[in-house]
Structure formats: structure tokens, C-alpha cells
Amino acid sequence: MPYKRTGLAVMRIQPLHKGHTALINQMIQDCDTVVIGLGSSQKSREKHDPYTVEERIQMLRNVYADRIKIVPLKDIGLVNVTDEWVLYIFDKLKKLGLPEPTDYYSGSHADASWYKSHFWYDGVVSPKQCFQVDGKCMVPRILHIMDRQKNIYPAATELRTFLETRTDGWKEWIPAVNHSLVQGSYPEEFKIACPEEFKIG
């Protein structure tokens, strides 16, 4: 029996770059519904989290319009891998009337470790089919890892360094539609002074 698939990925998007969009594009190809959880939604204007949740939502909307569902997720103070994080996400999605995810997409094995007890796939059951357990149709929850260690995309930390040093290396890796938002919203206090500002009159 075929059924609809719902993909989930949790990202901070500080800022949205081509590594994110490659993963989201794969989700759109695979799934009927795509849900992006915006991690650390309560943080902004910090070195590690310079953009506000509203700015990050706009970055996604500028590229995907309404093709994806966006759900802000707050840090809940967890340090070690625990089911509490996934249960928090599932509860939030349920309260918003979104379907329970069938697929989780991760950019690293470290990130995936938070989800391995809820998403799995043994390669026997087709991801488009459910299977019978005690007369009930069970949907296989699949974990997809697009390991960032094996792709060409720089990390967001590297892109923020370009912004900090006022160099244009970030522009190659960020969708052009977001260039003005990414540059204009990056806090001035995090930028290194231009050489002209060091000159003595």
C-alpha cells in the first residue's frame, strides 16, 4: 500500500547556503511534504547566530515560497543525545497539524545521532510501501545522511567569516536572491574594520 512521505530536517540556517538547498531540494524530490525545523529560533545577533528567526524564514521563502513548511524550534537545553529532542519536535508538529515525519534528512552523522532511535531503514522494505506488523500497516521511518564532509559546500561558519572580514567569498555559496538580505542583516559590530578605517587622517 503506497502512502505519502513527509520529510523533516532541522537546520539553523545562519545563513541559508547551497549545502542547505541541496538537502532541501532532495527532500522536495523524495517527499510529498517537506518540513524545515529552524533550530535555535530564540537566538539572534550573536556571533554564532547572527540572523533573526524572521530573517531566516525570509531566506527560505525567497527560494522556496510556500513549497516547504517552516517550524521554528527553540533550544531546550539538551547537551547529550536523548529522545526528548525528537519528542519535542514531533509534539510541536502535531500541535501545528503537520503530519508525523517519515523521513529525516541530515547533513552529518553527528546530527543524525539525535534521530537514529526514531528513523531507520533496513533496505528490505520499499520506502514507498508500508509493511504489516500484527495486522497493522507500519510506515518505515528512513534516515538520510548527506554527509557534509563528503561534499564541496563550505560550512556556514566559513561563510560568516567572509561576511565578518567584508570579503565576497560567501556570494558563490548563497542564493543570489538572498544576497542583499544576508549582507544587509549581518550585524556591523561583528565585522572587522575596513583598512580605510585604520588610516590616520
Image (cartoon, rainbow, N blue to C red):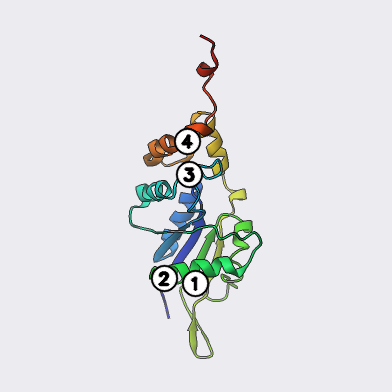
* Amino acid under disc 4: Pro
Height in image: 112 above or below 83?
above
* Amino acid under disc 2: Lys
- Report the mark closest to the observer, 1 or 3: 3
Q: What's the residue at 39%, 39% (across, down)?
A: 181
- Report the mark closest to the observer, 2 or 1: 2
Height in image: 2 above or below 106?
below
Residue projecting furthest to the top = 201
Q: CA distance from mark 4 to mark 3?
A: 13 Å
Q: Secondary structure at mark 4?
A: loop
- Report the mark closest to the observer, 1 or 4: 4
Q: What's the residue at 38%, 36% (across, down)?
A: 180
Q: Which residue is mark 2?
A: 95
Marks 2/1 in contact by CB < 8 Å: the verdict is no
Mark 3 or 2, nearer chain start: 3
Q: Which residue is mark 3?
A: 15
Q: CA distance from mark 3 to mark 2?
A: 27 Å
Identify the mark at residue 170; answer none if there is no mark: none
Mark 2 or 1, nearer chain start: 2
Q: CA distance from mark 2 to mark 1?
A: 26 Å
Few, some or many residues within 10 Å of mark 1 (<14, 14–19, 20+) = many
Q: Quadrant of residue 110?
A: bottom right
Camera sees residue 5: no
Q: Which residue is mark 4?
A: 187
* Amino acid under disc 1: Pro
Q: CA distance from mark 1 to mark 4?
A: 44 Å
- Report the mark closest to the observer, 3 or 2: 2
Few, some or many residues within 10 Å of mark 2 (<14, 14–19, 20+) = few
Coordinates of residue 76 in the picture (x, y in percent)? 56, 60
